[in-house]
Image: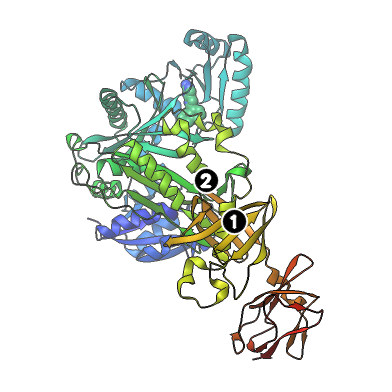
Amino acid sequence: MFTKLLIANRGEIACRVAATARRMGIRTVAVYSEADAGAKHVAVCDEAILIGPAAARDSYLRGQKIIEVAKATGAQAIHPGYGFLSENAEFADAVHAAGLVFVGPPAASMRAMGSKSAAKQLMESANVPLVPGYHGDEQDPAFLREQADRIGYPVLLKASAGGGGKGMRVVERSEDFEGALASCKREAISSFGDDKVLVEKYLIRPRHIEIQVFADSLGNCVYLHERDCSVQRRHQKVLEEAPAPGMPPERRAAMGEAAVNAARAVGYVGAGTVEFIANQDGSFYFMEMNTRLQVEHPVTEMITGTDLVEWQLRVAFGEALPKQQHELGIHGHAIEARVYAENPEKGFLPSIGTLRHMDVPRAVAFELGSDGANPAAVRVDSGVREGDAISPFYDPMIAKLIVWGVDRTQALARMSQALSEFRIVGLATNIAFLKRLVEGEAFATADLDTGLIERHGATLFPPATPAPLGALALAVFALRGDAANAANDPDPWSQANGWRMNGDYRRVLSWSDEFGAYRVGLTYRRAGLEIDLDGQAQRVERVGHTGDDLALRLGETAVQGVVRRDGDVFHVFTGGGHFTLTYNDPMAHAGEVETLGGRLTAPMPGKVVAVLVQAGATVVKGEPLVIMEAMKMEHTIAAPGDGVVEDVLYEVGDQVADGAPLLAFKAA
Ligand code: MV4
């Protein structure tokens, strides 16, 4: 086996490959750009070499430089991950020419699958089912229109050199054909430099079902079953799962064998994915083959109890496949969600920023797989850590969240729970969107097709709602740090029961968000705390906390959640939602307090409603000392600096005149 592997990638896939290499006792070499100097993948590898500036074309796409680094560090093999150079035949050739091993398929297989129409012609001869259509070299418009009439409308025009949905046109009627063809050719020539077009029967509400295949260099080739990747947005996968809901075993075998035929037809070696498009009735057709390991490979690993990167390394080293077809059963169900730094409410714009806070879901106890494999029930593959910035130079993926369940129902429940535990502060994410997707009727009932997200836009992008009282209550308790140390903190201020030295008193705290200000009234009674907002009042008390979770009882309702403070911004995660509340801290105006020779005087006539310190207390700048009520407002008299309160001159309930000295204070 190799002793040293260079990983020619970054982010989560580089970390993921490094994890397997380490487990196999293979040393790893990372390459990184200037923007990634402090990145996680650099930290997890044994060595790391800078290969250029931030831009991918000056770093991760510099094949020759990468090969030089491999040779200089004594790496025997290069793993390309996915994206970047992973499907670059010239790079694969150059790696071989340098006497190194490219962990992936032969360059010839990449080239064979590179052109859509060439691939389809090859598949036809390999008995792989194709969508009824024409993908030959004849491009005469009248001829192509005859083909479309023969196929039957609606038909789909596709640029042969196209991909990812670019350069496609749906034609509903024969009379529209030649106009659409001309438009499709214009786009193809400008986008791909090749205006060759193919015509296909247009599938309505299709599903995207792909088969993981694996071939070794000794002639063995197996399929590791299917993944349903229908939940996409603009040809970007969002959720993936294995196995595909509702897949009958005989169809699974037929698709698997077709995929193996496709792989054999191009002399494939290594991990590959054959993508099919399927009708709702299950009929399936070859779409394309991806000659690399895919982002969504973990769902396959979880249901088959395999490590596909280990398979890649063993096969690249010349070993036989670790398992044969009959040893590859399906155990349970796995779902993957791609967590991105993007803002669904703003058209999924990437959200650049720093992960000021990142809670990842706790891995649930292992479950025994059918063959003794232990798929971790919750897995997070991530290339970033709390405190990292999401770089604007690359794909804004934060992590892949993968869950396993004994069946789809359990996997769904675990995904929903795991997404609730995935809390990020510092930039916008798609987590709430993913949660709405997973919990939505369509996905939950496996009513899947590639148009799901588009069709359910209204429920997936609900208008933002004002913070509920429960969220504000959680923020109030977090303000006091109740979640942390109320039990043993003598400071009367921090007691959540709010009881004060004498009598009830009420104060108002103010938060705001895009909906405006929330003036939250807190009335401290001997019986406990009452919270009110817009006239709605409820008793509230803390009933405990587990870890970071605060648990409150609001009236008769249980409220649970986590609050993460980022300065004056309170991020309240509760009920599956995330509310961003900015605290309007009256202390912010502490400077308005007059101090005469160390005495702190009343800024106006009023009533003392709280005395928070006793004579002799050592205090720090800004610490609340006395609260006065005047003109229906509350005024907190704060320590003007670090020092000692030498004397407290009034009690709760006392009326004080404007300018009256309230405390004797001695600055430190
Ligand atoms: C299709 C199709 C319907 N009918 N072909 C999109 C890009 C490429 N993967 C092929 N694609 C499609 N080809 C026929 N004959 C619908 C799509 C399609 C799609 C396919 C898979 C996953 C997501 C998709 C999103 C939109 C359209």
Of 581 and 534, which appears nearest the observer?
A: 534
Residue positioned 59% across, 76% down in the render? 501
Label 1 CB less than 8 angstroms from ligand 1: no
| Spot occupied by residue 295 in the image (x, y as percentages of width and height) | 40, 44
Does residue 495 lie above or below 28 as drawn? below
In this view, the mark in front (2 or 1)? 1
Quarter the C terminus occupies: bottom right
**In the image, is 535 to the left or to the right of 132?**
right
**In the image, is 97 to the left or to the right of 422?**
left
Of 23 and 472, which appears nearest the observer?
A: 472
Secondary element type, mark 1 = helix
- The image quadrant that residue 249 belongs to is top left
Mark 2 neighbour class, 10 Å CA radius: few under 14, some 14 to 19, many 20 or more: many
Residue positioned 34% across, 66% down in the render? 46
The Cα–Cα distance between marks 2 and 1, rounded to whole angstroms, is 19 Å
Residue type at the position of mark 2: Ala
Does residue 628 lie above or below 25 as drawn? below
**In the image, is 430 to the left or to the right of 63?**
right
Residue positioned 61% across, 50% down in the render? 467
Q: Is residue 10 visible?
A: no
| Spot occupied by residue 497 in the image (x, y as percentages of width and height) | 53, 67
Of 228 and 590, which appears nearest the observer?
A: 590
Mark 1 neighbour class, 10 Å CA radius: few under 14, some 14 to 19, many 20 or more: many
The dot on residue 472 is 1
| Spot occupied by residue 609 in the image (x, y as percentages of width and height) | 68, 72
Secondary element type, mark 2 = helix
Residue type at the position of mark 1: Leu
Q: Which residue is mark 2?
A: 432
Q: How is the image coloured?
A: rainbow
